[in-house]
Image: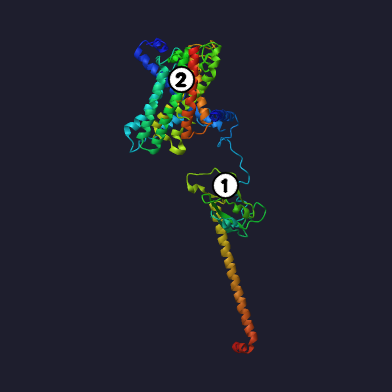
Amino acid sequence: METTNFVYNLIPNETIAIIVISVIPLIFLIVYALLAILGELKISAWIQERLGPMRTGPWGILQPIAEVVKLIQKEDLTPDSANKPLFNLAPYIIFMGAYASFAVIPFSRYFVPSGINIGLFYIFAVGSIAVIGIVMGGWASNNKYSLLGAMRSVAQIISYEIPGAMAILSVAVLASSLDLEKINIAQEGGIWNWFIFGGQGSWSKIWVFPFTLVLSLIYLVASLAETNRTPFDIPEGESELVAGYHTEYSGMKFAMFFFAEYANMFVVAAVLTITFFGGWNSPFGNFMQGPGWDVFWFISKAFFFVILQIWLRWTLPRLRVDQLMYVGWKVLLPFSFICFLFISLFKMIN
Amino acid sequence: MLEYIKNVWLGFWTVIVGMKITFTHLFEKKVTVQYPDDRYPIPPNARNKLHLEPTLCNGCTSCARICPVNCIKVETLRVVPDDPEQPMIADGTKRKLWVPVYDIDFAKCCFCGLCTTVCPTFAIKHTVEFEYSTYSRDDLYVRFSDMSPEKVAEKKKMLEEFQAKEKAAKAEAARKAAEEKSKAEAQAKAESSPVTESKESN
């Protein structure tokens, strides 16, 4: 195994090192999820000119902990007519799909849980596992709303994966690699070298800038759809489908769905950061650049996109199903194809 | 095609505009009032919990009679004329009735405010207090009378004695009246038929 990981140098025993490496993202994920829940509550409140939670701790900062405790305490219901093994397995499969992506996310040049050279492809592959979990949960619930929600969700995720993948593919073309670390290294040297501005290179990259900008937007929109967030949350449109595929879930299992949604939000934000916004690189060139700063820049950029997702959620209403398909197939897909074509052409000529 | 491009641009642009609007709202003054800590001022004419000033109440029972839901219960006792206290109502007039029972059942009260309008001495009033929910319905039954049970018993006894005395006096008066009447009648009889009387006297 490569030693791009500081844990291997720190812990000589490889088995223990691997366990530590796989646990670190989980700890991060738990802390992040609590912060994101708080962010969601507070930002939604501030946008609506409310104060949000104020009673739990100073300014309500302990609210997410209270919510988690509440969810754990709740009765774990399984409907009588549900298919029990599938029903019980579904939330964990969805979470597994989200958590598996963390294996390749490079937090720093010295901490990549698993530095495989097809990281981008891997993220897209394991990201699709969530679809199976959603179908399992929706179908095994034996509830018409759950089933409809699951069907909608799958249709949505599958249609939005294509423009998202096209956007990512353009980055693979620009970086000539699927390795997330190499993509990061290809964006070194300040904000101007990020892939949203066309990556490293001469001034001729100005021609590619509009396309990369559009592609980053396309990926942002597609990632919103993949995480079932507003404005693409028709799978759980409560006015039509109660709560979509997790209508029948309660307590711990519902918490897993919730957790998986937030984990997914971070994964897509991380992918967007890595592919278009320089990943762990500092925006000021060599200033504030280094293994420690890597973590800071990566997490703060990813958090910015998580907050952007929350901000979008409390701005936009939900799309109708046909509008969703229209946006996916008739807007994002042709645009991503055009951009991909131009970027490939540019890369070929340059 | 142009229509399509326009449409896509419009979609994108409206999202930007919407996000700008929500962003400005992020920093605007919040409308939340942290209720138990600070609260909206309640207008002074708000009709919330009733309050009776027992020193002002003259026991006229107008409120009990006008109450549409019969939530007010008033019992009165006459003030004896020779009462050593010589009680006064707070507005300066002489008290004619004690009010040993003045109960309001807030479980029934509909906050119509009729009792406050009919009260001649302004003894019953709405307050701005609205947080008096309780765990038991019985706790909503509020007794407003300021008379202690001993005092009530004393006044009752006093009234009974007075009434007995009055009754005795009345009976005496009636007896006297009857006597006089019979006397007068007898006289009248004697005057009208002196012959028979003289006969009898003989």
Please name the residue that numbered disc 1 is placed on.
Answer: B49
At label 2, which amino acid type do we have? Ile
**Residue B157 lies in what quarter of the image?**
bottom right
Residue sitting nearer the eye, B63 or A223:
A223
Residue A152 located left or right of residue A282: left
Q: Are marks 2 and 1 on the same chain?
A: no
Residue sitting nearer the eye, A281 or A71:
A281
Q: Which mark is residue B61?
A: none
Residue A116 versus residue A317 in the image, above or below: above
Please name the residue that numbered disc 2 is placed on.
Answer: A168
How far across and how far down the image is residue A77, in percent?
Answer: 36, 36
Residue A225 located left or right of residue A75: right
- Disc 2 on helix, strand or loop? helix
The chain letter under disc 2 is A
Residue B185 located left or right of residue A144: right
Residue A86 versus residue A126 in the image, above or below: below
How far across and how far down the image is residue A153, in percent?
Answer: 42, 31
At label 1, which amino acid type do we have? Lys
**Is any part of residue A35 visible from this angle?**
no
Label 2 vs label 1, nearer the camera: 2
- Disc 1 on helix, strand or loop? loop
The chain letter under disc 1 is B
How far across and how far down the image is residue B124, in percent?
Answer: 60, 51
